[in-house]
Amino acid sequence: MLKGSPLVMVPGPTPIARSIQDQMGRETISFNDPRFVAVFNSLIADMKSLWRCDGIVFIVAGSGTMAMEMGICNVAGTGENVLVCSNGHFGDRFIDICARKNFSLDTIKAQWGTSVTVDEIDKKLSEKKYSALVTTHIETSTGVELPLRQVAEMVRRKHPDVILVVDGVASAGASEFYMDWGIDVMLTCSQKGLGISPGLGIIWASQRAIDKRQSMPPISESYADFVKWIPVMKDTMQYWGTPSVNMIWALAEAIRIIKDEGLEERIKRHKLFSDAIRSSLSALGFRTGTEEALASPSVTVFFYPENPKIDDAAFRSAVYEEGAHIGGCLGVFAGKGFRIGHMGNITTGTLVTLIAAIERACIRCGYDVALGSGLAAMQKAIVSM
């Protein structure tokens, strides 16, 4: 029987540290109160420094989808050639966003559970003069991680005029990327690897991306226009849209946690935990939705064993009642398995609770596993790394 709130292990939102929750619960003050202005200015500086951005970081009230629109509409205009690469559901969402704009649009789509390759992108970019390449670092629907650094380096070396726009919704704070690899626009949102509630869209824009926007004529978007937000991000006393004061306080605390842990150490922890979870679920008879070389450190798809047949909804409901909330699969993978988000401020204790809940759910659903076998595999994986 469920007692208390289940552990949130979906691919976002992720568990929120108490100190971050405390910041969200502070008394709301004006966005031009000197106490808030100081925090906001410091936060922007930290986010530029941590991810090595030579341009501007935009921190805006909105969803990850809003950040996707904001990321592309400022660097490509009417009639310009744009290439979008999709590894799954959210790559397809970017295709839909771009299809609604007056771009000349081409796409590359990978089979679910696989990734577009550096060579495929290179070949396509060689066919014509493209203004922008759009791709996803970690595809949340499949758990696939694109080889982003290799893509960025190839684009800079062989197609230097192409603006590289990256969906980093499931990678910021969980997987390695730096803007100086050659990324022009990287976007994320607050509820994934940064470990906050939903509500903020975050866009890193290189100076080259800022220059591109400033060379373009007015765009149809208003709220999402870089030009409107640049004065605010340079001087947070300025106004365009009201900032989400308490969420920005929360983000400042999240960044403090990241700095205390160390960004590189945080990335190593995510890799360690993801490997441990995959080892654990493999010991219980589940298989992953992608090969190990493409497996992300922030989200994994696990397929049900073929024998016995496990009912998807019943299994996820049982896991929920046993104390953990896992996600359903999307698109091609729907009904075939489940998704686990393993990012943000989780601990080894989080993993123990998760795996124990899954083991008990297996027994409840008639899937005979040896209790403790998944936990043993997880512990062994952590100790050996």
Image: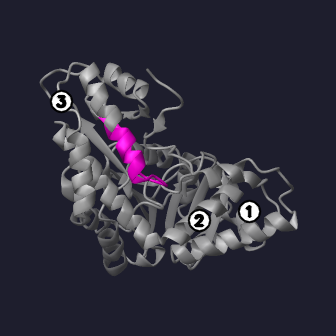
Name the kind of residue labelled 3 in the image: Val
Residue 371, position as x, y percentages in the image: 22, 33
Label 2 Cα neighbours within 10 Å, binned few <14 / some 14-19 / many ≥20: many
Q: Which mark is residue 228?
A: 1
The foreground one among 121 and 140 is 140
Near-viewer residue (370 or 158)? 370
SS at badge 1: helix
Residue position for label 3: 369
Would residue 120 appear left or right of 130 to someone viewing this image? left
Q: Residue at x 13, y 27 (%)?
A: 306
Query: Which portion, as a residue range, is magenta?
Result: 338-355
Mark yes or no: residue 131 visible. no
Question: How many angstroms separate mark 1 from mark 3 (CA)?
Answer: 57 Å
Mark 1 and mark 3 lie on one chain; the one further toward the N terminus is 1
Q: Is residue 348 magenta?
A: yes
Residue 16 image point, x, y percent: 56, 48
Q: Is residue 34 left or right of residue 117?
A: right
- On screen, 184 above or below 60? below
Pointer 2 residue: 255
Using a 10 Å C-alpha cutoff, classify the residue at mark 1 as few (fewer than 14 neighbours), some (14 to 19) or many (20 or more). Answer: some
Please determine whether, in this image, residue 43 is positioned above or below residue 63: below
**Residue type, numbered disc 1:** Lys
The answer to which of marks 1 and 2 sits earlier in the sequence is 1
**As drawn, which residue projects farthest toward the left?**
307
- Of the numbered discs in the image, which one, if any, rests on residue 50? none
Q: CA distance from mark 1 to mark 2?
A: 25 Å
Picture coordinates of residue 15, whole percent (x, y) = 51, 46
Quadrant (top left, top right, bottom left, bottom right) of the C terminus: bottom left
Mark 3 secondary-structure assignment: loop
